[in-house]
Amino acid sequence: MFRTAIDRDNDGIVVNAFYRHSRIKYYLKDRRALRIETVINDTYDLGVLRRLEHLDEIIAKTRDVNRRLLDTIRVVQGCVLASPALERVAQPTLTEDGRRAPALRFGDPRVMALTGALCLHLFAVTGVTNKRLRALTARLLGTTYTTGQMTYDLRRLRLNGLITRVEHTHTYVLTPDGQRLAIFYTKLHDRLLRPLLAADQPQAPPTLRQALTTIDQHVQDYINRARLKTAA
């Protein structure tokens, strides 16, 4: 089990991510530098035995946790995909060994729910499993999402080079392209397209509604001057 909490106070915002008995906290120290603190209250959370002789292994794994989280934060700030990479994922392709890699098309509800789930920062730290990713994807999708569908989606993520499997486990980790794709798809949909599609609604900013009204008037003027009849 995991959960997140955001604490707001006069000094800024602190994000806490809790996983089993452990916790990661990150915030701006004195509003000048990002600080990440990882607290391991039970070494079994990292798959490490207790006792002092395993201290070096614990330190190495916690530093790796901090690094992966920091990598994810960097990707969030700059997740634009080059056109060839986007085309490779959005269209069916063949892998180097000749296997067919199914597409992950932008706008498909199942794909959008899947990529939205993959944006969870905790997955960058703990990795992805069928069970955990399926539960979150089903919640975002809002409909039935079976184990078989999750297995298929994990396969197409892997064939497209977006996740890799941790050897001898059923856990996957996101590749750099996987992180960028998940965040790019989600940001583009939630922060750009969804607000624009609702731009003519009363809750949209007045300046945006006025701009769209002006555009509609100009388009209608062009139609009138071209003497195009309105479709029946």
Image (cartoon, grey):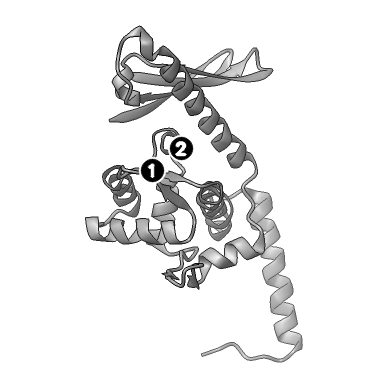
**Image point 37% across, 10% down: which residue?**
53
**Residue 66 position in % (x across, y down):** 51, 25
Report the label total.
2
- Quick check: 136 above or below 62? below
Residue 146 appears in the figure: no
Quadrant occupied by the N terminus:
top left
Amino acid tagged 1:
Val
The residue that label 2 is drawn on is 124
- Residue beneath the point at 28% across and 46% down: 135
Q: Nearer the viewer, mark 1 or mark 2?
A: 1
- State whether residue 194 appears in this view: yes
Q: Position of residue 118 (x, y in %)?
A: 43, 46
Q: Mark number for residue 166?
A: 1
Tag 1, which secondary structure?
A: loop
At which x and y percent is residue 106?
Answer: 50, 63
**35 up-or-down from 139: above or below:** above
Sequence-wise, the earlier of marks 1 and 2 is 2
